[in-house]
Amino acid sequence: MNFGYRFLHRFFYIIYKVFFSAKSYNAQEVPYDGGLIIAANHLSNWDPMLISCFLKRPVGYMAKQELFNVPVLGMALKNLYSFPVRRGAFDKTAIKTAINRLKGGECMGVFPEGHRSKDGKMQQAATGVALIAAKTQVPVIPTAVINTNKIFKLGSFFPVIKVIYGQPLYYTGDKVDKAQLQEFTDKIMQQIQNLINSDKT
């Protein structure tokens, strides 16, 4: 981890624990090294660092290109191992960057739905995460984010937020078979939903 990442990692960990009583489950079972994809549902802008701050390895993300043009934010994103992606189009450069990083042994966070859920329910996911998993042959960790959409909302200003890491999934199908890629995507999303359902509080 670079200094900037370590600082932000610790800063957000304290914020989440002190103000939101953040809890994590199964973080110790997430592999400490080797290429890895963390695939999670997406409720708010609080999600990426919540997912990352309980893990002992850096997690990088694709972030929309416009954010890198904001002076302070752009620098922070680079320190967080993030890289730009063009929204609204298939960005081959971003996909190639993701594949190269994963093959190089890095960990990437991915939100298969592609955007934040407006109602807190899981949305239809694109097959991008399955495609990347197929091309890199790295495990995918289904991950559930809970209650971040309630932060600073009337009625639950400081909710208890949680992140639950699941068991790894491996893509074993054909790299170019759209049906098999969709099937793997659906499996990831179902596992995330199962983790959400397992939370009883």
Image (cartoon, rainbow, N blue to C red):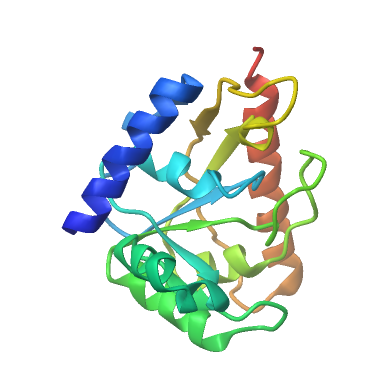
Q: Residue at x 64, y 29 (%)?
A: 147
The answer to which image quadrant residue 177 occupies is bottom right
40 relative to 107, above or below: above
- Location of residue 142 in the rendering, given as x and y in whole percent from the top left corner: 55, 43
Front residue of 136 and 46: 46
Q: Quadrant of the C terminus?
A: top right
Residue 1 visible in the displayed image: no
Front residue of 143 and 118: 118
Query: On the rendered structure, is 116 left or right of 163?
Result: right
181 relative to 34, above or below: below
Query: On the rendered structure, is 157 left or right of 52?
Result: right
Q: Residue at x 47, y 73 (%)?
A: 70
Q: Residue at x 66, y 83 (%)?
A: 90
- Location of residue 149 in the rendering, given as x and y in whole percent from the top left corner: 68, 37
The answer to which image quadrant residue 60 occupies is bottom left
Q: Residue at x 43, y 46 (%)?
A: 49
Q: Quadrant of the N terminus?
A: bottom left
Q: In the displayed orientation, state which residue is furthest to the bottom.
A: 93
